[in-house]
Image (cartoon, helix red, strand yellow):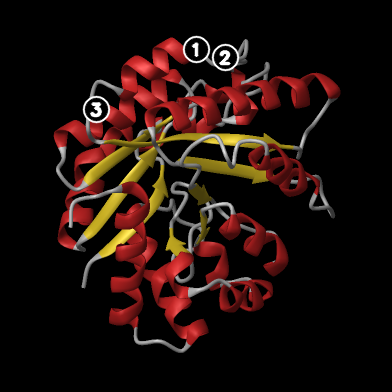
Amino acid sequence: MKYIDTHAHMNFAIYHDDIDEIIDRTYRDDVMVINVGTQQDTSQRAVELAQQNEHLYAIIGLHPIHTTSVFHDHDEVGEDGDEFTSRGEIFDIEYYRNLAESSDKIVGIGECGLDYYRNTKETKAAQEKAFRAQIELALELDLPLMLHVRPSEGSMNAYRDVLEILGEYKDKGNLRGQAHFFAGTPEIAQEFIELGFYISFTGVITFAGMYEKLVKAVPNDKILSETDAPYVTPHPYRGQRNEPSHVREVLGKIARIKKIDEYEMANQVMENAQNLYRLKK
């Protein structure tokens, strides 16, 4: 049985010391992986991994939290991460265009979008500017978008704003992509699907029952599996660092929620990913 992790971060520093072992496990477990960049250095690293391994692919772009000065995640930047403050990265469209054109293993732009978890007027404006630039680059290069959407606590505001922005571009090219780590409502999921987006779920569905209704609501031909490794480790590995091979637990849970044979679900999800990202079949 073949699996696909459509959103992981093997390009992060937390995997530096044992990356070869992590890659070996993805080979052993028949897991194809798309590693997603969050700024220039992690995007470049995702490309390097993809170039070195046939079953790995890359998505490149600027995460919304990196558009202004923020404390970096320790897992992302390594041992000095807790004390390292970013000056913020301005989305350099020439850099990312050149990088995208450097390899056919680059299959998308992102992760980009809006993150309102710790939001100010300044950060909102910077995030929207970078998001629009990445939408325009994706349309120019005919690549899918990897969306990061995180609302303020207790609201769906970021989803509504992202949908509004995407709606402005729906007639300007082949707009499509993936709504990563989706935590909206079934109605919002349908709005993304109507705009050409697939809906993906992480390991959180293995331990949070609130997602079952949402998973059931997404059509089988519009659903994707992901780990968001090293984050949200699925049951039964909670408390450990997440890794792409754990996508098998996510896929299995999707199949059980939908009451579909796991082999059939794995084939469907693989076909969905191949259709969206034009992966080798």
Secondary structure beneath label 1: loop
Secondary structure beneath label 3: helix
User: On the image, numbered disc 2 is attached to which residue?
Assistant: 89
Q: Are marks 2 and 1 in contact (CB under 8 Å)?
A: yes
Q: What residue is drawn where x is 76% and y is 38%?
A: 116
Tell me where residue 142 sits by quadrant.
top left
Cα–Cα gap, marks 2 and 1: 8 Å
Cα–Cα gap, marks 3 and 1: 19 Å
User: On the image, numbered disc 3 is attached to which residue?
Assistant: 48
Tell us which disc is closer to us: 2 or 1. 1
Cα–Cα gap, marks 2 and 3: 21 Å
Q: Are marks 2 and 3 in contact (CB under 8 Å)?
A: no
Tell me where residue 17 sits by quadrant.
top left
What's the amino acid at mark 3?
Answer: Glu
Mark positioned earlier in the residue sequence (2 or 3): 3
Residue 92: mark in rendering: 1
Q: Nearer the viewer, residue 104 or 172?
A: 172
What's the amino acid at mark 2?
Answer: Glu
Q: What residue is drawn where x is 35% and y is 87%?
A: 261
Residue 54 picture location, percent across and down: 14, 43
Secondary structure beneath label 2: loop
Q: Are marks 3 and 1 in contact (CB under 8 Å)?
A: no
Q: Nearer the viewer, residue 116 or 176?
A: 176
Asked if residue 62 can be seen in this view, the reply is no
Residue 131 picture location, percent across and down: 61, 28
Q: What residue is drawn where x is 50% and y is 63%?
A: 203
Tell me where residue 34 sits by quadrant.
top left
What's the amino acid at mark 1?
Answer: Asp
Image quadrant holding the C terminus, namely: bottom left
